[in-house]
Image (cartoon, rainbow, N blue to C red):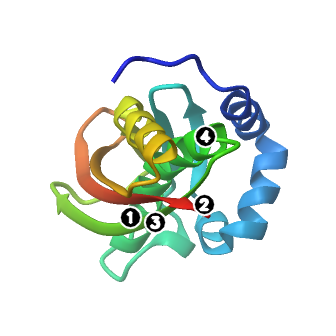
């Protein structure tokens, strides 16, 4: 699909997400369990996103590593924030979004902060643009990779998003 200019509403969402205090309040209000467990946004760009989940008491499991559900929240957020950004940019068309599937592979024990990197924003952008233009549903699967501070791959997630036009 041909690259379209970055929509002003998407740019406004990116600016909002880049304000740590305001975005933290948003997380507290809309995703309180992610906020409480410590999932934080580190970077949001036109093509990707980086989130982090710390290893701490609220995010640990009995085996002294980060609980897999907390890793999943950070991975999902790394793909969900760019999707939200492009859904807002689809205005005046309304598009809804929903996770319809997730597959995960765990390579190493997460005993410190884990950074999830998502670099497939163009796939989300194009799917949302097609839904906004045609009104037909689109389903895409994108990947987020979790790494430790030294770059060791901790986990990889394949998250399937469904986009539908709203009446």
Could you tell me how far apart the alpha carbons at marks 4 and 3 are, in whole angstroms? 16 Å
Could you tell me how far apart the alpha carbons at marks 1 and 2 are, in whole angstroms? 13 Å
Circle 2 SS class: loop
Circles 4 and 3, Cβ within 8 Å, touching? The answer is no
Could you tell me how far apart the alpha carbons at marks 1 and 3 are, in whole angstroms? 15 Å
Q: Which residue is mark 4?
A: 90
* Disc 2 packing (10 Å; few <14; some 14–19; many ≥20): some
Left or right: where does residue 14 sit relative to residue 70?
A: right
Q: Which residue is mark 1?
A: 72
Q: Between disc 1 and disc 3, whose residue precedes?
A: 1
Q: Which residue is mark 3?
A: 98
Which image quadrant for residue 37? Answer: bottom right
| Camera-side residue of 154 and 94 | 94
Circle 3 SS class: strand
> Which x, y percent locates residue 105?
17, 60
Q: Between disc 1 and disc 2, whose residue precedes?
A: 2
Res 38 label: 2
Circles 4 and 2, Cβ within 8 Å, touching? The answer is no
Question: Which mark is nearer the camera, 4 or 1?
Answer: 4
């Amino acid at each position: 699909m041909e690259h379209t200019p970055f929509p002003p509403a998407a740019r406004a969402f990116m600016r909002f997400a880049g304000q740590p205090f305001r975005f933290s309040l948003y997380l507290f209000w809309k995703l309180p369990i992610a906020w409480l467990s410590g999932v934080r946004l580190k970077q949001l760009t036109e093509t990707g996103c980086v989130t982090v989940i710390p290893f701490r008491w609220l995010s640990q499991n009995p085996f002294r590593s980060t609980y897999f559900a907390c890793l999943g929240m950070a991975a999902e957020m790394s793909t969900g924030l760019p999707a939200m950004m492009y859904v807002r940019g689809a205005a005046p068309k309304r598009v809804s979004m929903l996770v319809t599937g997730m597959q995960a592979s765990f390579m190493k024990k997460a005993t410190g902060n884990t950074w999830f990197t998502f670099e497939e924003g163009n796939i989300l952008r194009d799917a949302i643009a097609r839904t906004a233009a045609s009104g037909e549903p689109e389903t895409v699967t994108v990947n987020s990779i979790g790494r430790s501070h030294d770059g060791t791959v901790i986990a990889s997630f394949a998250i399937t998003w469904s986009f539908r036009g709203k009446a």
